[in-house]
Amino acid sequence: MTGFSAEWLALREPADRAARNLDIEAAFIAALPQDGPVRLVDLASGTGATVRALTERLPRPQVWVLTDDDPTLLAEARRNADATMPASVTVEERRIDLSADLARLEFDGFHGVTTSAFLDLVSRRFLDTLADRLAAAHVPVLASLTYDGRVACTPAHPVDEPVRRAVNAHQKGNKGFGPALGRDAAGTCSGILAARGFTVRTGPSDWLIGPEEHAFQDQLVRGWFAAAREMMSKVELDAAALDDWLAFRLDAIGRGRSTICVGHIDLAAVPV
């Protein structure tokens, strides 16, 4: 699986936290047992942002199992948990390569499954397999912050749209799970889970990144630039125009004039 650094995950966490759709989270929480401790497994956990976001909304004992294939991220998740989690919350880590070993992860015994910023990285085949496992275990699912292909930058630049198309084409590449669904992930997942008897709700969870978040914007724009350079042959974009776009964007960020909106979808699915 394509990895992400702890530094990048820390930069994006405030935007993720602000973007989460509370109504969609509430639908998931309502499907959990209302008495006693809840046991949850989080897929592709990174440094544990999902548990940090949801713990306060579950005011009862919790056991979380965090899964990732990156031992550095899992170690950071452990440090974060030790520093921030109340005594009523137990956090365990499990190193697992979900792209190869999903079958080793048992969902029986859990009350719910969560994931964040993950579904747009996986393939249709992986989602079908995951949905079969979730349906067999009869557990509710919360999938937060799935990229949906929408991007809007202010101030505008003439190459914004070709860059967006290039980034979306790049998102469809293999991220370790086969051809990724990219911007189509939330809609595809909704259909797959509905076909397996889940009631599915979705809602927007867009990043609204203000001028003060200059470090996050800088890394985001540079990442888009790198992705677009790989895809120039597939869209109406040349190297000089792309270089001009990057210089324009970085100048706006440096001057405190840049705002960026990135579209995401949150999804809650409850077995009937």
Image: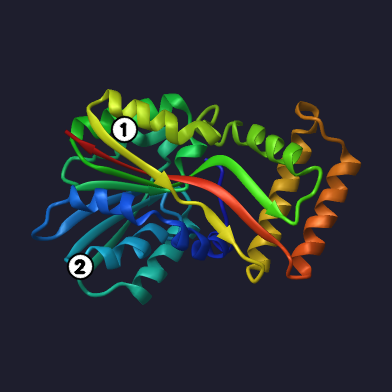
On residue 103, the disc is: 1
Q: Which residue is mark 2?
A: 59
Which picture quadrant has residue 198? top left
Q: Secondary structure at mark 2?
A: loop
Please provide percent x and percent y for residue 32: 17, 50
- Between 23 and 193, the one nearer to me in the picture: 23
Q: Residue at x 81, y 52 (%)?
A: 246
The residue most toward the left is 35
Distance in Å between CA atoms under marks 2 and 1: 31 Å
On residue 207, the disc is: none
Left/right placement of residue 24 relative to residue 217 reads left
Q: Secondary structure at mark 1?
A: helix
Q: How packed is label 2: few (under 14 Cα within 10 Å), some, or many (20 or more)?
A: few
Q: How packed is label 1: few (under 14 Cα within 10 Å), some, or many (20 or more)?
A: few
Q: Residue at x 54, y 35 (%)?
A: 183
Left/right placement of residue 163 relative to residue 70 reads right
The residue most toward the front is 155
Among the two numbered marks 2 and 1 on one chain, the one whose residue lies closer to the N terminus: 2
Q: Residue at x 43, y 24 (%)?
A: 125
Q: Residue at x 36, y 65 (%)?
A: 52
| Front: mark 2 or 1 | 2
- Between 150 and 193, the one nearer to me in the picture: 150
